[in-house]
Structure formats: C-alpha cells, structure tokens
Amino acid sequence: MRAAPRPNRTSLECCRGPLLYIVGLLCMIPVVTALCALILMALRASHTGYTSHIDASCCEEYVALLSRIVNRSINPCESIYDFICDRYSAQAAPGALLDTRLLEGSWGFKPSETLAGKLAYQYYRSCVMSTVQGERLGAQTASALLAFLGPSVNFPLRLIVEISLKYAIMFPVLFLSEAMFDLWPSSLPKRLHFSVHNLAVTLDTNPEPVMSAEAKQIYLRIRRDALRRVNEALSLNVSELEVDELYMALRVSLDSAQDYVASNLTDLHNLVPVLTAEEWRALLENVTRSRITGDVFLISDVAMLKRSLDILLDATSRPENAVFSLVEATSRLLIGTVLEKDNRDIRQRYFMYCHNASYVMVLPLLLVNLMETLNAGKLHDTMLQVYFSAITKAVSERAATLVAQQDVESVRRYVQRTRLLLPSEVFSLDLPLPTLTNNYAQNYLLMHASQWTLYSITVNGGVPKFITLKGILGRKPLFYNDVVVLPISVYLVVNNTSRIDRVVPLATFSMLIADTLWTSVLNSNWSDATTRRLERRQVCLTEENRTEQSFFFYHPELSLDTALDAARRKHWNTTLKFYSYQLQRISRSQLFFLLIIFHYYCPATKHAPYGRRRSEANHLFLRSDDFREAFGCGVKAENAGGPEC
C-alpha cells in the first residue's frame, strides 16, 4: 500500500522564518539610527563646551526621547518566544527547555506542568519585564546619577547617554542584531552588531556594507526613512554621511562612565543593609514594576530556601508566584550550564540572550546576598582546600606519565605552585556594601562604583591583577596566572543541598577544577619532545572517539563512584565512563555536571507521562543512553535499576 502523499507546505509557511528575520531588521534600523542621532547630539554638546550639570528640563526631554526610541521598537520577547515554540519540533528544540510538546503550544500564559515549560515561561516573563522597563530604567539611571553626584559635578552629556543606553537600547536590540547576522551571515553591515556579552553597545568600523544588491536597496530605503523620522521627531538635521561617520568613529561602552563615577564618589561604605523579606518584596516589585503575589525568602534561611525551591518546582504552582524568589539565582546557575553548550544553533542563542538579560537585571540583588552566601560557604573552605591539594597531587602524577622525562620536574613545580582562590578570599567579609534603596538605577550605580565590581589577586612579584565580577559569578573555575578562581556557584550549590547530597556537587566541582588545571598543563609550553608526545596522544584519543582534554580523575576521595555511593548508596553505572564523544565535545566532568543537574531536577518530572520524561532526558543527556541509565531517569522501569524518578 502506498503511503499517503505529504501535504505541500504553503508559500506562507515556507517564508515565515525569513519574514520574521526581516521584521526584526525593519524594527532595528529606527532604534540604531535614533541611537546614533542621540550620540551625535551628545557629541555636539560636548564640543561646544557643554560639561556642566543638566537641568530638569533637559532630563524631561531626555526621558521623552528614550520613550520614543523604545516605543518604535518591537517587543522582542514575545516574537522570539513565539518563533521558537511554534516554529520548531522537539527534535530541533534547543537544550531541554523549548520542546514544543513540553510547552503545549503556548507562548505566553499557560506553561506546561513540567520543569522545562515552567522555566521557559519564567525566563520569558523576566525578558518581558526587562524590555518593557527599558526606557524607564534608562531615564531613571540618568536622573539618579545626576542626583547622586550633585549639581556641582561637571558631567558630560555623553556619559549620561552611554549609561542610559544600556537600559533603553540593550533589550530591544539584543535579539534583533544577532538574528540579522545569522539570516545573512555575509550580507549585512557589521557596523550594526551590538555586543551581548559585556552588555554594552558596540558600533563596528566596517565602512562599507557587504550585501546583495537587492538587500542593500531594502536596507538603504529603510535607513533613509528611519533617519527622516528621527530627524523630524528630534528636530535635527542629521545626514546619512554624519551617521556613517558616527558608525565608524564611535565605540560606546560603559567603561568611561564607570571610571568617571568611581573617581567622583566619596563615602560609599555605609552600614550593610539588613532587609526583611517584605522589604525585599518591595524592592523586587520596584525593579520589576509588577505585583509579586507569591512568597519571597531570604537566601540565608536554608529552610525557607528549600521551601522556595519546592514552590519553583511544584507542577501545580504558577511560575509567576515564585519567579523572583531569591533562590532563582541558584536555579539559573544550574540550568544555565545545560544551555551553555557548544551549539551554534541560532534558536538556542536567542533563548540564552533572554536568559542573560534577566540575570543581569537582578545582579545588584545577588551582590547584596553574596555576604550571607560567603559566610555560609566558609564552612566548606577547609574541605575544598583538601580537595584541591588532592587534585594537584593527582594531576602532577598523571602528567608525569605523559610528558618527556626532562619536563617532569617542571610540570610538577608548575602544578604545585598553583593555588585555589576561594570566594570568601575574593570578597572580604569586612567589606561593607553601599546602602541600597528601592531605586534600582541608583542601586546599580552604587554597586558599580564600589569595590564589589572588581577583585584583585597579587601575582608576579606583587603586581595586582584585576578580574571582572564575571569571573566569580561564572559557572566554571577560572585559571588565571597560576590561580584557580572558584566561582560563587560552588557555595550556592553546596549550601543549598542536604548533608548527604553535598558530596556530589563537591566532587563535581573538584572534577571541574581538575579539568581546568589539566587543560592548562596540556596547553602550556614544554619541550619539543613533550609537545610531540601530547600531539600523538591527542590524535590517538580522537581516533578512539574520546575527548582530547579530559582528565580521568580516579583519586579515591574524589572519584565519581565514591561520591555517588555516598549520596545514593548505589554504584555508578560503569558505562558512564564511555560516553559518546561524537554527540558533544565536552569533557567528562562537564557531562557529569549535567547529570548532577538532572539528578536534582528529576523529581519535578516524576508525574509526567513516560514520553515527556524521555523527551526531557533526551535533551539533557544529549541523547546518550549511558547518562539516562546512570540514575534510571527517563527509562523504562524494568531497565532502570536506580532510584525512581
């Protein structure tokens, strides 16, 4: 019997994806052009000697300008969420979060009763809140900065523009710029690229757009129309040539503004604020401009933290009830690791941008809670140092079997001189925080003008080296000048697990530290003989479908078997050690980290149908049966052999 023919796709269905990208392009041009006009106005003012403080009428005009810019842009969150969830099937969904079946075809108001659906909806709401409040935060930042510095401080308009652009322009443009580059990788002007990672606007210096003739005409027509409307709205007369010159000459960042603020502030070290849960609620409601009807817990209260996590994972609870609980930071650190894989798929990167934007929005709130987290984390410092000592010993011994004889002693000294920098060493527990208010913009400025934005480590004869806050708030150990910087996520995860389960994340982070140090050893410059030997090893491992850089860490105290045996009284599935290198080129320890994440989230799916559980497991474990079988999650009961999930 012949199979029924597949229905032909309509032309509308075929063109839907490109049309969405074109809409993004159309909506971005007015934003970029208005941005350039705004900067041009600032530069003109600075060139005419305008460096005095700005009066109230100017601020009102500036607020109105920001509102007009944002109102001309689309709301990116709904469009992208709709685009991802309606457009792609489960097989193409990024990570574990955006399976159409998990989201039940809904893109705004009815999340599915799975962890995946709840988290997707949670990030969607955060992204919407960030975008909607962009113009308000931008204007609030400008006015708060002026009020904080006082009328006697000379503050160029350009610096206010730079700071405010972070709020008013970042969120609408965040999604559109990358969309355009992936739609036509070599046909759009690179000058329109906006940096995402440092969350500042970057105007590239490519003088001529390289694009097809048809695309170029469309772009130029849109650009001329946008420039005309911006000129009319702002009563300006900016030519296309002037806009080109701005694109080529300017690189807008927050660095100069932050330096200026830091050099003009005096007394920031007030008493550390002690906020009640209700005060936190008021602060969060002020930041989000929304009513928080659920519970808000303090991260220092472990019992309440557990309760908050239960609410977040409860399939019967709507996610908005706990979306801004302070425990959200922990879930972000964990789930973000699942998303941050080496996947170039544009759909996944779209989702990560919304995730990053919502994470940055609450950064000052996370900094306030660092104090409590560090105090609690110090309980584990001794254990972490013991682990690190064992790591350096094992790495040194393992390296001695691979390098040439003349390099053995050099490698040993290289490994032994490394030290572990604990989070509690990075931020002094005696360092006071600035007093925060319910003014989010001023809180942000206070934080970025205080010592909490950088920390220094002294290396190479006492020369201080500075690392940005991103290092300590990252998800992986950072190796910097013989120092392994341990991220704060270690404390967040370890402090929020039970006594029995604590050995699992500790062993996990030990594996990550070992991999970090091991990678550094393999990438360092040794003798030619060692280089040839390591190159042969890499070829051999690649041919065997094993990762090139993985350090198989079998120290008795830190082995995965020991950790899991202590945590679940069940020996590790031996097939875990032979994962498929072809599916994902990441180290064994990173894969283990994914497994730990799913281990903690697994109870959230215990009531889900078998097919849905299997779908989540497929995404989390990268379609590897070895990992699903390790804890028996997402497999048939008769084959599980592990704890019920």
Image: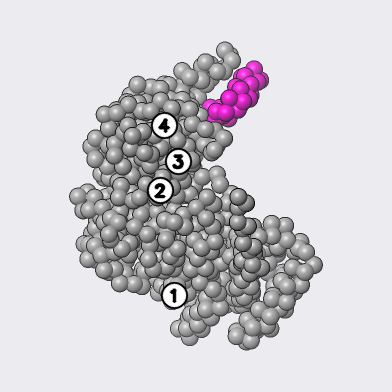
Gap between marks 1 and 4, in whole Å? 44 Å
Which comes sooner in the sequence, label 1 or label 4? 1
Q: Position of residue 202 (x, y in %)?
A: 61, 61
Give residue 511's mark.
4
In the picture, the quarter occupied by the C terminus is: top left
Quadrant location of residue 375? top left
Q: Residues within 10 Å of mark 4 (few under 14, many from 20)?
A: many
Q: Amino acid at mark 1?
A: Arg
Q: Residue at x 39, y 71 (%)?
A: 148
Q: Position of residue 211 (x, y in %)?
A: 76, 63
**Residue 640 or residue 162, whichever sits in front:** 640
Q: Is residue 546 left or right of residue 189?
A: left
Which comes sooner in the sequence, label 2 or label 3? 2
Q: Position of residue 123 (x, y in %)?
A: 42, 60
**Residue 92 or residue 326, whichever sits in front:** 92
Q: Is residue 242 left or right of residue 360?
A: right
Q: Residue at x 54, y 33 (%)?
A: 581
Q: Amino acid at mark 3?
A: Phe
Residue 26 among those drawn in magenta:
no
- Circle 3: element type: loop
Principal secondary structure, stretch drawn in magenta: helix
Which comes sooner in the sequence, label 3 or label 4? 4
Residue at label 1? 136
Q: Residues within 10 Å of mark 3 (few under 14, many from 20)?
A: many
Choose mark 2 or mark 4, whichever is in front. Answer: 2
Q: Specify the segment rendered in magenta.
A: 519-548
Gap between marks 3 and 1, in whole Å? 41 Å
Residue at label 3? 621
**Residue 541 or residue 189, whichever sits in front:** 541
Residue at label 2? 611
- Circle 1: element type: helix
